[in-house]
Structure formats: C-alpha cells, structure tokens
C-alpha cells in the first residue's frame, strides 16, 4: 500500500498537467479560429470594396460610351444595360457574402469538432490512469 501513495500523487500531478495542456491547446485553437474568421471577414470586405469600385468604373465607362453614341443614360436600352451591370455586381456580392459565411461556419465547426475530440481523448486518458492505479493497487 505504501507504493500506491506516490503513484497516486504522480498520477494526480500528471492529470493536472494534462488538463493544463488541454486548456492551453483549447485556448490556442479558439484564438486561431477567431483569427481565421476575422481574416475571412476582412477578405470579404476588401473584395466587396473592389467589386464596388469595378462597378463604378464599368458604369462610368458605359455611360461615356452611351454619351459618345448620343444616347442618354436614362434611355430604355442604356438604363437596362446599366441596370444589368448593377444587378450582376449585386449577385456577385451576395455570392461572396454567402461563401464567406460558409467559410466562417466551417471554421467554427472545425473548432467544435476539435474540442469534442479533445474531451474524448481526455476522458480516455483519465480512465487509463485510473485503471493503471487500480492495477498497481491490486
């Protein structure tokens, strides 16, 4: 029985260290997930600004072409062409936003899966340690 006390103390210390390591790993994974999500959001915002700038230039170019042809931007076909450019840009923006949301969701799902897997790993190591202690005690 005298040999079991130091072994139990060592196992308790080991479990404490494993727990601290898991906590650190979990915190790092959360921080990484937040950083990745922020990067996805920032990339989407930059791309959205670029698309808006491209639309502005395309509309200005098209208006200039219509003006050179003697058409006003308010005429039927000119307005339809300009409206088509704006609608296409809006669709692209919505698609990019949806894709960014999916990427952010995937990052969250990956983090959740890592945490679940970590909990399962932790519980199995505790059972192994407890079983090992019981074997040594018997």
Image (spheres, rainbow, N blue to C red):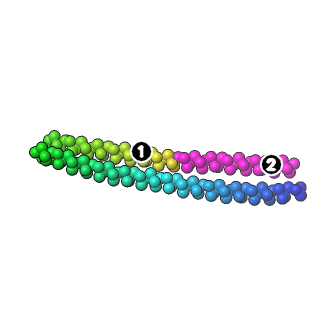
- Measuring 37% from the left and 43% from the top, which residue is drawn there? 95
The answer to whether one can see residue 76 in this image is: yes
Q: Nearer the viewer, residue 62 or 104?
A: 62
- Measuring 41% from the left and 52% from the top, which residue is drawn there? 43
Q: Is residue 132 located in the magenta-colored stretch of the structure?
A: yes
Judged left or right of residue 79, residue 36 is: right
Q: Which mark is residue 112?
A: none
**Which structural element holds mark 1?**
helix
In the image, farthest residue toward the top: 77
Q: Distance between the Cα atoms at labels 1 and 2?
A: 49 Å
The residue wearing badge 1 is 99
Q: Is residue 39 located in the magenta-colored stretch of the structure?
A: no
Judged left or right of residue 34, residue 94 is: left
Judged left or right of residue 75, residue 27 is: right
| Neighbour tally class for label 1: few under 14, some 14-19, many 20 plus, Cα within 10 Å | some
| Magenta stretch: helix, strand or loop mostly | helix
Q: Position of residue 76 (x, y in %)?
A: 14, 41
Q: Which comes before the other along the chain, label 1 or label 2?
A: 1
Q: Where is residue 128 in the image (x, y as percent from the top left)?
A: 76, 47
In which quadrant will I find the N terminus? bottom right
What's drawn in magenta, residue-wise? 109-138
Q: Which of 127 and 59 is in front in this view?
A: 59
**Which structural element holds mark 2?**
helix
Mark 1 and mark 2 residues within 8 Å of each other at the beta carbon: no
Q: Position of residue 7 (x, y in %)?
A: 82, 56
The answer to whether one can see residue 74 in this image is: no
- Measuring 50% from the left and 55% from the top, which residue is drawn there? 34
The residue wearing badge 2 is 132
Judged left or right of residue 8, residue 71 is: left
| Neighbour tally class for label 2: few under 14, some 14-19, many 20 plus, Cα within 10 Å | some
- Measuring 24% from the left and 42% from the top, which residue is drawn there? 84
Of the residues tagged 1 and 2, which is closer to the observer? 1
């Amino acid at each position: 029985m005298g040999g079991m006390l130091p072994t139990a103390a060592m196992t308790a210390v080991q479990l404490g260290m494993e727990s601290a390591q898991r906590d650190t790993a979990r915190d790092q994974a959360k921080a990484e997930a937040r950083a990745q999500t922020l990067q996805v959001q920032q990339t989407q915002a930059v791309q959205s600004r670029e698309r808006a700038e491209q639309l502005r230039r395309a509309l200005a170019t098209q208006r200039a072409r219509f003006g050179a042809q003697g058409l006003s931007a308010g005429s039927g076909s000119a307005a339809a062409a300009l409206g088509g450019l704006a609608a296409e840009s809006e669709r692209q923006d919505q698609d990019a936003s949806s894709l960014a949301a999916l990427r952010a969701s995937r990052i969250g799902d990956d983090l959740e899966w890592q945490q679940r897997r970590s909990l399962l790993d932790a519980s199995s190591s505790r059972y192994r340690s407890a079983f090992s202690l019981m074997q040594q005690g018997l």
